[in-house]
Amino acid sequence: MTVTLPVIGACLPVETIAEYRDWLFEKDRDLELQSFHKAEVLNGDWTPIADEAKRLLDGHKGRIGIHGPFWGFTINSLDPDVRRLVERRLMQGLDVCDYIKGTHMVVHSPLTAWDYNNSGNYADSWSPVLEATHDTMKAVVRRAEDLGVALVIENIDDVDPSRRRLLVESFQSDAVRLSVDTGHAHYAHGSNGAAPVDYFVKDAGALLEHVHLQDADGYADRHWGIGEGTIRWHAVFRAIAELPQKPRLVLELRDAAKIPSSMEFIAENGLGQ
C-alpha cells in the first residue's frame, strides 16, 4: 500500500513570497499570508500589498488564506462596545480574503489557562463565553459563509482542547473550524499540564481545517524550525494521517530561513513532503 505523504505549506508575509515562490509552486503548497493582521494595515490602503501577492501567486493552485487580526483584543470581550470593534476588525480581515480569494482566516481562541483553572469556581462560567463570542462573531460567520471562508479558531493559551471544540461546534456552521498550533499546544503541555500535541489534533478530529507547524520547548512560544524543539513529531503526524480530511499544514516559523531545514527534517523522517 502506497502512502501519500502530506504536502507542507507555509505562513509568509507578502514580501517573502518571491524567495519561496518556486518551492510554493512545485507542489502547489498551501499558503497563509501574514501581512494583514495589524490594525494600521487594515485601517489603511492594503490593496497594493494584496495586489503584489496576487501577482506573485498568479497560477498557484494551492489553498490560500490569511492570519486574521488579533492584537489587543479577544473575541469574547464582556464589553459590548469592544465586541463591535472586534467585529469590525474581523470584517476587515474578510475584506482581504474577498479581495485575494482567500479561503481561510485564522482567529485566536478566547480561552485561557485562567479560564480552565477557574471553570469550577463559578456556578456557570461557560455561558458568558458562549454568549459574548457569538455576539462578536455572528455577523462575521454569516459573511464568511457567503464568501466560502473558513474561520479557523487557533489554540493560544488553551489547556483543554475539547472546550475550544465545543465552542466551534456551537456555531453549527461549516464556516467555523478548528486550527491547532503545535507550539502553543506544546507550551500548554509543558507549562500548564495540558495533554501532548497529538491529543489536540485527535480531539479536533473532522473539524480540524488548519495546523500551524512550529517547534518549541514546552515553556514558551518559540516558533522554532521543525526538529529544533521537543515536540514528538511522529505522534503528531500519525494523528494527522488518521483524519478523514486533509487540513492545511503550514510552517509558521519566526525565521523563514528555517523552512529548508524544517522541510529536510520532515522529509528525512518520512512525515511530509
Image (spheres, rainbow, N blue to C red):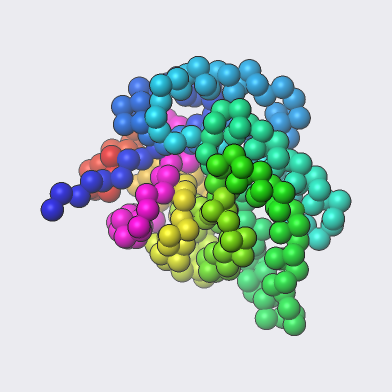
* Residue 249 location, quadrant: top left
**Residue at the location (46% across, 55% down)?**
208
In the picture, the quarter occupied by the C terminus is top left
Q: Does residue 258 show up?
A: no
Q: Nearer the viewer, residue 174 or 109?
A: 174
Is residue 141 visible to us here?
Answer: yes
Q: Is residue 43 above or below residue 264?
A: above
Magenta stretch, residue numbers: 231-259
Residue 232, x across and y down, in percent = 35, 58
Q: Which residue lies most toward the front here? A: 146
13 relative position to 238: left or right: right
Relative to residue 142, is residue 161 drawn left or right? left
* Quarter holding residue 21: top left
- Residue 33 spot, x, y in % from top left: 53, 33
Q: How many marks?
A: 0
Residue 81, image x, y percentages: 86, 51
Residue 42 higher or lower than 127, as above or below: above
Residue nearest the observer in this picture, 230 or 19 = 19
